[in-house]
Image (spheres, rainbow, N blue to C red):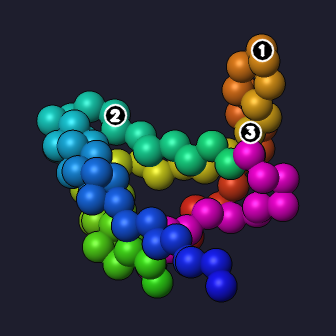
Amino acid sequence: MKEKIIAVTVRGQKHLRELAMVAAEGQRAVLLFAVLHSGIEDVSPARHIDVAYAEKLVQAQREGVEVLAYQADLSAAGMFLKTPLIVSL
């Protein structure tokens, strides 16, 4: 039986705190999810895997961090953002 991988991100929580501090200083703070899978229409944190990250993401948004998601293409020439996606927190 294949072992299930759980992706808890303590480092991601740290980055959210840092972005919130940037926003508190009056600067623009943006978290951008670049989605490469063409079948994805909306983005949300995996609350069932990492509750702490999901809660910190909601808190960071309340504190002024913009949370954006875009459909993206990746090629040898670079990454190109195409279509904005819904972010559900």
Give x and y (percent) for residue 84. 70, 47
> Residues in magenta?
36-47
Could you tell me the amino acid type at mark 3? Answer: Ala
SS class, disc 3: strand
Could you say which quadrant of the image residue 1 lies in? Answer: bottom right
Could you tell me the amino acid type at mark 2? Answer: Arg
Give x and y (percent) for residue 22. 22, 37
Identified at 29% across, 73% down, the residue is 52
SS class, disc 2: loop
Left or right: 89 with respect to 24? Answer: right
Q: Please give the residue where the numbered disc 3 appears in the rendered image.
A: 72
Could you tell me the amino acid type at mark 1? Answer: Ala
Specify the label residue 28 is tagged with: 2
> Label 1 near label 3: C-beta < 8 Å?
no
Query: Which residue is more in the foreground, 61 or 49?
Result: 49
Q: Main secondary structure of the magenta part?
A: loop
Give x and y (percent) for residue 80. 73, 28
